[in-house]
Image (cartoon, rainbow, N blue to C red):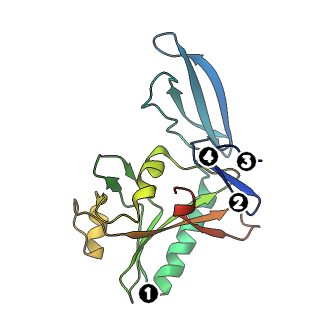
């Protein structure tokens, strides 16, 4: 049985709420003495940022995610190289934002040379990868023209000026646990209905 906020795909459960991959979660007091949650993200044995999440603060959220390190970067580089070899225009990590100011940096932003359609590919690797709060805010709006804008000069190569609103964008999730597994590709809309 799945918990609320989960989607089961091919035996893999992805949570729509931020859950730290490869992390430790402990409780402790916040600045005002009320209970809070501390999460320490780890990647390859290295400890990442520690973030306090006050459960009484509706705007608080776990910001750090378990970055999957060099393997993630290798997958992004391979996809990018394959797309460039196919004549597809690609930018890595451009900033796109909601008009309210929340932003995300998709791993790959691409433009189909034949039809001109825009695409975002978010790569997730490792066990139980998660979305950042920015991704969780921005990605549900990818297919809504005008709800996002470019905050990145990188997209000027696509004819999109910094500050310009974006048309509808196809969002894809590339999920690959490690080099021994085959990638699974899903529409991001499956995670953000």
Q: Residues within 10 Å of mark 2 (few under 14, many from 20)?
A: some
Gap in Å between the C-alphas at discs 1 and 2?
Answer: 27 Å
Q: Quadrant of residue 185?
A: bottom right
Q: What is the number of the mark on residue 189?
A: none
For residue 87, side relative to residue 5 (left or right): left
Question: What element does badge 3 sit on?
Answer: loop
Whole-angstrom CA distance, mark 4 to mark 1, is 38 Å
Q: Position of residue 100 (x, y in %)?
A: 29, 46
| Image point (25%, 75%), residue name | 159
Query: Which residue, given by chain and number where applicable, does mark 4 sit on?
Result: 5
Front label number (4 vs 1):
4
Q: Is residue 49 above or below residue 122?
A: above
Where residue 71 appears, x then y in whole percent?
Answer: 63, 60
Numbered tag placed on residue 2 in the rendering? 3
- Residue at 49% of width from left, 85% of height from top? 85
Q: Residues within 10 Å of mark 3 (few under 14, many from 20)?
A: few
**Element class at badge 1:** loop
The residue positioned 73% from the left and 47% from the top of the image is 2
Of badges 3 and 1, nearer the viewer stands 3
**Residue labelled with disc 1:** 87
Instruction: Using a 10 Å C-alpha cutoff, classify the residue at mark 1 as few (fewer than 14 neighbours), some (14 to 19) or many (20 or more).
Output: few
- Residue at x 62%, y 52% (from the top left corner): 68
Question: Which residue position holds label 2?
Answer: 177
Front residue of 179 and 135: 135
């Amino acid at each position: 049985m799945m918990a609320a906020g989960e989607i089961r795909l091919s035996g893999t459960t992805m949570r729509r709420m931020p859950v730290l991959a490869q992390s430790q979660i402990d409780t402790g007091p916040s600045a005002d003495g009320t209970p809070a949650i501390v999460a320490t993200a780890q990647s390859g044995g290295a400890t990442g940022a520690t973030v306090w999440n006050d459960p009484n603060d509706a705007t608080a959220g776990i910001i750090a995610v378990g970055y999957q390190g060099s393997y993630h970067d290798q997958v992004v580089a391979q996809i990018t190289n394959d797309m460039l070899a196919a004549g597809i225009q690609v930018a890595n990590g451009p900033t796109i934002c909601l008009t309210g100011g929340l932003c995300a940096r998709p791993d790959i932003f691409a433009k189909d040379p034949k039809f001109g359609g825009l695409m975002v590919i978010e790569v997730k690797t490792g066990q139980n990868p998660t979305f950042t709060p920015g991704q969780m805010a921005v990605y549900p709006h990818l297919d809504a023209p005008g709800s996002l804008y470019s905050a990145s000069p990188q997209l000027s190569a696509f004819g999109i000026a910094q500050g310009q609103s974006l048309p509808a964008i196809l969002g894809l999730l590339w999920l690959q646990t490690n080099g021994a597994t085959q990638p699974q590709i899903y529409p991001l809309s499956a995670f953000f209905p």
